[in-house]
Image (cartoon, helix red, strand yellow):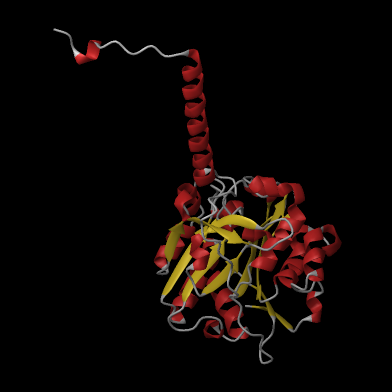
């Protein structure tokens, strides 16, 4: 008895074979392209995906309070508390019920003493201040270069945030959404969705040397919102940094200059590259804050093109002394 599995296949002509092969290849190519558009780490996605834009997280200027506060000291929590009081209190920036996202630099698998990431004590202090202002939730996030779980843990930031009642927000591959940054170089790009789910954003960068941009402080810290192949932006790094600063307008910026990585940034690793400066700088103008902080790296404004570019776009002033500022030691 014959079996259906032993049934002879009908003969097929060469023309039919080639026709079927072409159709199969076309289908495979189409499937591969769709997979690329859907899952590639490049800033390309399906046309049907929603395109987001950043909201403006800023609060109004106040004639009753300085625009910039420089605090020197050794007790980081006391320094942060003093800075906020001089700026009008955290309640000036955070309203009851606000969802807050804090963006430190947590890019590297380094310990606090190596100054590759923001001081965990400062991050914890800011979480405390936000919770005291009755924020409904306080998240802390970054898109790390090294393994994020190791980076958040070894930096000390994960522990500091949890002790202060905040929540760590790890950004996975599924947490990026297409966002129109409306820049000259940076246009539609994958950005962490957490920034589109909150009411206020606080930038908490560390002062570091950077091998390409000369420095990474407040403006450069926004690289940590991006997914995709960020190294592609290094071809025009000054314009891309300026585009980011133009797109993301934070509620508040607090610069960590307690420990400064003066050489071999942004990764560091050697304690001999770290300078103890025991300073934090807080305010609303990121360009002014960056311009002041250049002193810790022996740089001038003219050494850092993105500062002048940002000032020309009206994002802030490089002459920080022209602002109403306070400097004191606690």
Closest to the observer, 195 or 318: 195
Closest to the observer, 79 or 84: 84
Which quarter of the figure has residue 306?
bottom right
The quarter of the picture where the C terminus appears is bottom right
Indicate left or right for 286 with 300 as reference.
left
Q: Is residue 109 above or below residue 135?
A: above
Q: Report the residue that reaches farthest toward the bottom.
A: 64
Q: Position of residue 66 (x, y in %)?
A: 69, 85
Which quarter of the figure has residue 72?
bottom right
Which quarter of the figure has residue 320?
bottom right
Q: Position of residue 177 (x, y in %)?
A: 52, 57
Indicate left or right for 290 with 159 as reference.
right
Q: Position of residue 154 (x, y in %)?
A: 49, 50
The quarter of the picture where the N terminus appears is top left
Residue in view at x 47 percent, y 55 percent: 175
Closest to the observer, 53 or 282: 53
Closest to the observer, 80 or 284: 284
Q: Is residue 127 above or below residue 181?
A: below
Residue in view at x 55 percent, y 64 percent: 52
Q: Position of residue 315 (x, y in %)?
A: 74, 72
Indicate left or right for 327 with 89 as reference.
right
Q: Report the residue that reaches farthest toward the right.
A: 302
The answer, for residue 218, to whether it is visible in the render is no
Q: Report the residue that reaches farthest toward the left.
A: 1
Indicate left or right for 82 with 216 as reference.
left
**Number of numbered discs visible in the structure rendering:** 0
Residue in view at x 55 percent, y 67 percent: 122
The answer, for residue 241, to whether it is visible in the render is yes
């Amino acid at each position: 008895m014959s079996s259906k599995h032993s049934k002879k296949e009908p003969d097929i002509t060469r023309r039919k074979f080639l026709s079927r092969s072409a159709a199969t290849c076309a289908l495979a190519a189409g499937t591969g392209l769709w997979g690329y558009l859907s899952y590639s780490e490049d800033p390309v996605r399906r046309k049907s995906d929603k395109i987001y834009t950043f909201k403006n997280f800023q609060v109004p200027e106040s004639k009753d309070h300085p625009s910039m506060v420089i605090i020197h000291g050794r007790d980081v929590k006391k320094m942060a508390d003093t800075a906020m009081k001089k700026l009008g209190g955290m309640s000036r920036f955070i309203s009851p019920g606000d969802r807050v996202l804090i963006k430190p630099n947590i890019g590297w698998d380094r310990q606090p003493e190596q100054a590759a990431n923001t001081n965990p004590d400062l991050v914890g202090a800011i979480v405390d201040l936000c919770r005291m202002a009755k924020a409904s939730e306080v998240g802390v996030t970054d898109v790390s270069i090294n393994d994020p779980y190791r980076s958040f843990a070894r930096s000390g930031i994960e522990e500091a945030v949890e002790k202060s009642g905040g929540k760590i927000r790890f950004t996975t591959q599924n947490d990026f959404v297409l966002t129109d940054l409306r820049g000259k170089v940076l246009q539609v790009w994958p950005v962490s969705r957490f920034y589109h789910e909150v009411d206020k954003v606080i930038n908490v960068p560390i002062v570091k040397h950077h091998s390409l941009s000369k420095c990474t402080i407040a403006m450069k810290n926004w690289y940590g919102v991006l997914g995709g192949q960020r190294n592609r932006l290094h071809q025009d790094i000054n314009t891309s940094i300026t585009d980011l600063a133009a797109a993301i307008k934070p509620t508040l910026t607090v610069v960590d200059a307690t420990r400064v990585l003066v050489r071999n940034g942004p990764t560091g690793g050697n304690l001999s590259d770290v300078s103890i400066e025991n300073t934090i700088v807080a305010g609303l103008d990121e360009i002014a804050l960056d311009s002041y902080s250049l002193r810790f790296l022996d740089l001038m404004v003219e050494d850092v093109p993105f500062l002048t570019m940002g000032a020309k776009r009206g994002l802030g002033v490089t002459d920080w002394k022209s602002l109403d500022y306070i400097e004191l030691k606690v």
